[in-house]
Image (cartoon, rainbow, N blue to C red):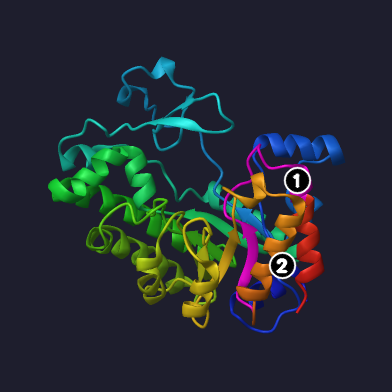
Amino acid sequence: MTHRENFIAAMHRQPCERVPFQFSFCDSLKQELMRRHGTDDIVQYFDMPIQYVSLPEFPTEPIYTSYHEHPEELSFIDEWGVGHKRGSTAHFTHFFSPMADFTTPEEVEAYPFPDMLSENRWKVVREQVEKTHKEGRAAAFFAVQVFEPAWYLRGLDNMLMDFLTDEDMAKVCMDKMCRIQCQIARQAAKSGVDMIIFGDDVGSQRALMMKLETWRQWVKPATAATIAAAKEISQDVLAMYHSDGVIDDIIPELIEIGVDVLNPVQPECMDPVRIKQNYGDRLSFLGTVGTQTVMPFGTPEQVRDTVRHMIETVGANGGLTIAPTHMLEPEVPWANIEAFVQAVQDFGGY
């Protein structure tokens, strides 16, 4: 089986030859890969089964500086108009939300959203998918989200308060973003990707970041609409839902709205083995190896034991792509990365 065939079979919980794996690097680890092996292409070097594809960013037109009080102090403004200021730690930036001071739905409607349907952009995606498939890998589109880009624009505090106290503002922000993201989902499915990453971070380390009723009112319908938009184009496209944190309460409803694969199943917050036992007949998983614990702070032997345990439990009878639960950050020792890869090779055969 090719990587692509094996990955698709695994995510459909059908017979496959091996457990797929995936991970991504922060900039400093890419530099370390280049120093050690003369390349920063982790997919090619580690022969990963999945290649993520995405829309190329266009220059920010129109200019969004008028939506920021001190644009000269920003590191950059992204194509949505969100301001970013780099901090002292790795790749993280502080967000400055251009809609933070909006008081009326009309201001949201008048905001100059970027053109996400440009043929020039989607031509690049189709080329990425074609190249990936020729290499025998699965192509995964990153990403279709509603709540997160809406709050990037509005500000997280404002967005959560809108949900509770200003339904007109909440509705216009979520509806506008949902329409845009449905368009993106359809185009991604038309581009021939094998999987689309949906979802938003709605879990904290201890619980959902909002009441379940609030999630049901505002986030669930938008997520359902984007998944449905993609599956209208292709019933074969896998829908992966991403949220960090504790999201046990919404898993049954994610399955209800068409989620095929759950990510990252953060073991510091949830029990991957229990979730597999409860939902493994209806849901597959991508993740399960902690990036708050074992990957940065465990020994290579502990990484190896964790990978083996997750393959033997969550990976039983298929349904697992084993992966760290987040991008690998600078604290992760190179020996732990090597231990992860070797453990997948040693224990990942069916």
Give how far across and how far down residue 239 sits, in percent.
49, 68
Dot label at residue 41: 1
Q: Nearer the viewer, residue 314 or 19?
A: 314
Which badge, 2 or 1, comes first in the chain's sequence? 1
Q: Is residue 43 magenta?
A: no
Helix or strand or loop: what does disc 1 sit on? loop
Q: Is residue 292 above or below residue 234?
A: above
Residue 49 visible somewhere in the drawing: no
Q: Nearer the viewer, residue 69 or 159?
A: 159
Considering every residue shown, the one lying at the far right of the view is: 37
Give how far across and how far down residue 169 sits, in percent.
18, 45
**At 45% across and 67% down in the image, what residue appears?**
230
Type of the residue with mark 1 = Asp
Magenta residues span: 318-337
Q: Is residue 335 magenta?
A: yes
Q: Which residue is mark 2?
A: 308
Q: Nearer the viewer, mark 2 or mark 1?
A: 2
